[in-house]
Amino acid sequence: MYIGRFVVVGPSVAAYRVSSRSFPNRKLIERPAGLTVVPTADAEETTNPYVSYNCVRTAGGHAVVGNGSHVDPITEKVERGYPPRDALTEALLAMDYEKDDYDTPRIAGVLAPDGTAYVGIVRADAVLVRAVEEPTLVATYEKDAPEAIGFDAATAADAAREAYSAAFEHAVCAAGVSRRGVGDGYDTAVVNDP
């Protein structure tokens, strides 16, 4: 089944996976601000604004994961003291779904320093933001409402590998985030290889 890009959030780990039929030549790179999706060296040039973006950022004791440029305003809001639910809701509403041929939803999640976690999606027909107490998946297609999922990862590396290996079609790369402890920051990891 092809569900497109997806996030798994909560309560102490998060993951993001790029799944793509249209732009498979992408990878994750580490940057000072977090993890960024970029085209590989052999990718065709494109002006598509949805191909390259920050997908993981940490700031203000929070970790934010998502499938596009909305990760940045969510991160900025939690860093300024917004509650994660409000940061997700406001940024998703402001950015809206992607204006591409598929009306691709924007998906995101937040791990908060107090041990709570949230997941959200904005689609053409709805905005959903939920607190999560167990690993919860939301994807751009087919599984476009938050749902509990079996996800056993405890570390960032395990989360990235488990997301990459999940039984959904067209995996490209994956990121994982894990909380070191309440208030102790986060570890991140990437999987770029098949």
Image: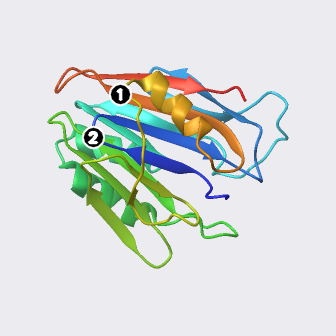
Residue shown at 64% from the left, 35% from the top: 173
Residue at the spot of label 2:
11
Spatial CA distance of label 2 from label 1 is 9 Å
Residue 96 visible? The answer is yes
Q: Residue furthest bottom?
A: 125
Residue 34 position in % (x across, y down): 45, 27
Residue 77 position in % (x across, y down): 27, 46
- Judge left or right: residue 180 versus residue 30: left
Local packing at callout 1 (Cα closer than 10 Å; few below 14, some 14-19, many 20+) is: many
- Judge left or right: residue 112 versus residue 98: left
Residue shown at 66% from the left, 27% from the top: 192
Number of marks in the image?
2
- Judge left or right: residue 188 versus residue 160: left
Q: Is residue 165 above or below residue 184?
A: below
Q: Is residue 192 above or below residue 19?
A: above
When asked about the image quadrant of residue 64, the answer is: top left
Residue at the spot of label 1:
178
Element class at badge 1: strand
Of residues 148 and 58, the one drawn nearer to the viewer in this rendering: 148
When asked about the image quadrant of residue 61, the answer is: top left
Q: Which image quarter holds the C terminus?
A: top right
The earlier-in-sequence mark between 2 and 1 is: 2
Residue 11 position in % (x across, y down): 27, 40
Local packing at callout 2 (Cα closer than 10 Å; few below 14, some 14-19, many 20+) is: many
Q: Amino acid at mark 2?
A: Pro
Q: Which mark is residue 138?
A: none
